[in-house]
Image: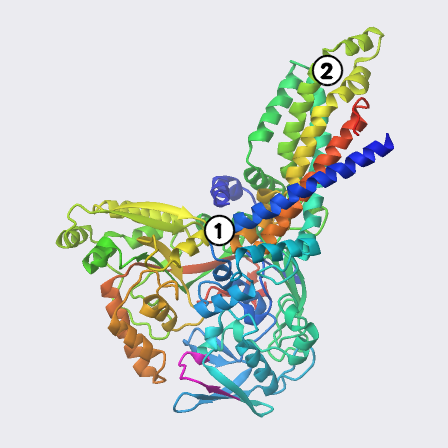
Amino acid sequence: MRAPLGRYVVRRLLYALPTLLGVTLAVFLLVRLIPGDPARLIAGLLASDDEVQRLRVELGLDRPMPEQYARFLASVLAGNFGLSAVTRTPVIEEIGIRMRATLTLAVTSTALAVAAGLSAGVLAAAYHNTAVDYAVMMAALGGVSIPVFWLGIMLMLLFAVHLHWVPAGGTGTPAHLILPAVTLAAFSTAIVARMTRGSLLETLNLDFVRTARAKGMGEGAVIIRHALRNALIPVVTVVGLQFGTLLGGAVLTETTFAWPGLGRLLVSAITARDYPVIQGIVIVFAAMFVVVNLVTDLLYVAVDPRIRYG
Amino acid sequence: MRRISAWVLLAASVLVAVPTAAGQAQPPPKTLRIAVGIDADTLDPAGQTTTTVANMVDYIYETLLRPDYARGTVAPQLATSWTVSRDGLTYTFRLRGGVTFQDGTPFDADAVKFTFERLLDPKTRVPLRFLVDAIKEVQVLDALTARFVLSRPSPMLLSNLTYTTTAILSPAAAAKIGAANLVRDATAAGTGPYLFKEWVRGTSILVTRNPAYWGKAPAFDEVMFRVVPDAGTRETMLLAGDVHMAMLPPAPDVRRLRENPNVTLVQAPTDRVIFIGLNTQWGPLRDARVRQAFNYAVNKGAILSSVLFDLGTVVDSPCPAGMFGYGPVQAGGWPFNPIKAKQLLAEAGYPSGFEVTFFTPTGRYIQDFQVAQAVAAQLRNVGIRASVSTMEWPSYVAEITAPPERTRLQMFVLGWAWVVLDCDGVLFGQFHSSQHPPRGLAPAFYANAEVDSWLDEARTTVDVEKRKTLYHEAQQRIWNDAPWIFLWAQKWYVATVKNLVGVSITPIEKWDAIYATWK
């Protein structure tokens, strides 16, 4: 089992290489297709044409496209993605600074979403068609429909301005993490809860559950030990996808809470047409998505021993 | 992100009903916390492009001269006195003695020479190099006397030497930090009242009081600039007491903040003139009567109070008040007179108006998109059918820098501000024919040979009175030719907690809070 799994992982990672190469070409072309001259945007409106031209040369934007792409690929292979056009800092360093903030927020809110979403989903399924079920589903509907910036501002007004329990925005202490994590988790929690409920309800109708009940097992044990485990596969898929999305930077939440994550860096890089930073972030996102998907697939094995890779 | 401010507005009742901690009796904080809208792009004075970033850099570095806004002139800072030769080609500065850089090395003429040679070196990134590009050479006469030799007369030079770009660096500290790192490290490199401590990218910049500062010591031990991109969040953080001052909270909330007993709203007019450019080389807009009709058709005062929450002052000249050379042309601006507008349109051969496209950015200037919609509605009353469209800022910049043969511009919203208070910035930058895109950024494509010659002469003569006369003539002519719908000079504002006093706003969109105190 061990060897084939290892081979499977290596093969999946190798498959990712052409994907990532495609991503480099796509992002390289896309940033250059959108209107906006990086040199003018960075130098500002007041800069003279000469300075803008000088900056264009400094940034290598006067070089032919194939040469620019080759330089970009070389910087990817070198692992630093080149220098930010704005700050002249290695892009990998700019990304590294924000990566911690993004990871902290993504992991915390995913953990919250899994804990709250699973519990709520199980409760809703266990008390199917009762007030509990309806309440959970209503809350979940709210979770998927409320825009995060509105939810964020409301939470801030209540817990920061009104009650003074937590700071409104920024970073520094663990307390700073609470509001953005809760805001960001709202949507994922709702998705996980709905998925858990639906999947569990299906499983509860299967024969082996009837058998478990027939042998006199308590309803709680039936649900947790037998049904839930079998209902988890779609939930794991959803959590993996959600986590991948969150790693891609939760732009609105990061902006609302002044959270210094990758999403905000990407937006500000796009606004400045900082090509190297945009390219670097998109590649990092693509790579992270590949890894998260792989981990999700591997988790299937843990959840369902019938699944084999190799 | 704009929608957030609308939501904040919706939440107004909640906010008003809620007592906040901001403003309650508190001991003075050790660290003054200021929420700014953008992160720094560079801490290097030479690389400055944005006034908010320059504002933070001003805590660390100082210039030879400082602007005296009250008197409309320049005042001593690191230079105590200066003389200008009759031909305007030699400037001799007497430097302040006994000043040391934060690294302990003395501030002297060598440092001045080092700083300006670095600014003139093409290898240094200096977007605003035009401020100093008349300087040919800097000579050290003695330890405290420096002489600038110019290649051409530059009557704006003294004003230019007040801007952050020209701040003096310690040669020793600069060598220690390294040329490539001055972008992100300013450790002990300036003479300013605060020392650079830390820049956490995307989060904050921290400065601490300079114990060896030559001037008056500021009140706060530390100042932290917190990067908070969303205006609604800046306001919320102020109300929650997370920060003591927030720049530019959402404009629709300004009235309520003024009424909030725990908050002070500090606002002041600036030199940023907001206008609607008219492409003077496009179709019906080639006719000055049509452009004048547009000016008559728009009720600036009404838009200012209903859409802009009074965050502006209607301009009465192409060059806003407070600049050197400013001369009011028409009190109260072009009068609102739709009847006259229709009459002019009829005279020009457009009795039933015409269609025109109208571009505006969104969120770049206060209420810009809303202003464009209001203007379009008023133009419709005189038969002009303007269709408003907006785009993100980088694409917008691509539109306004397109050359005349490719431009899609017919009408467009733009704001123009200069970093020093001299009419040259707006008049030459916007109305001299050499500044048409793509060379410059004068997308109204206004061209008038006489105006060109006045503006050329005004930027090369050192005769102060002559310059004023030339600018007055130019303002009169441009005003009547109406290449813009002249709107207003925008105000700039910050909100502070009530305890913080002594904060002011400068005419170049900076806050001045170095000597703010806690009460």
Chain containing mark 1: B
Nearest the camera: B506 or B481?
B481
Is B398 on the left-hand or right-hand side of B44? left
Q: Is residue B489 above or below residue B472?
A: above
Residue B491 found in image quarter: bottom left
Label placed on residue B257: 1
Q: In terms of secondary structure, where does tag 1 sit?
A: helix
Q: How many marks?
A: 2
Q: In terms of secondary structure, where does tag 2 sit?
A: helix
Q: Which residue is mark 2?
A: A203
The amino acid on which the numbered mark 1 sits, given as a three-letter code, is Leu
Q: Is residue B452 above or below residue A120?
A: below
Q: Is residue B329 above or below residue A28?
A: below
Residue A308 found in image quarter: top right
Q: Looking at the picture, do discs 2 and 1 lie on one chain?
A: no
Answer whether residue A152 is magenta in the image.
no
- Residue B374 appears anywhere in the view: yes
Can you say which quadrant of the picture contains the C terminus of chain B? bottom right
Q: Position of residue B224 (x, y in %)?
A: 63, 61
Q: Position of residue B131 (x, y in %)?
A: 46, 75
Q: Which residues are magenta?
A: B147-158
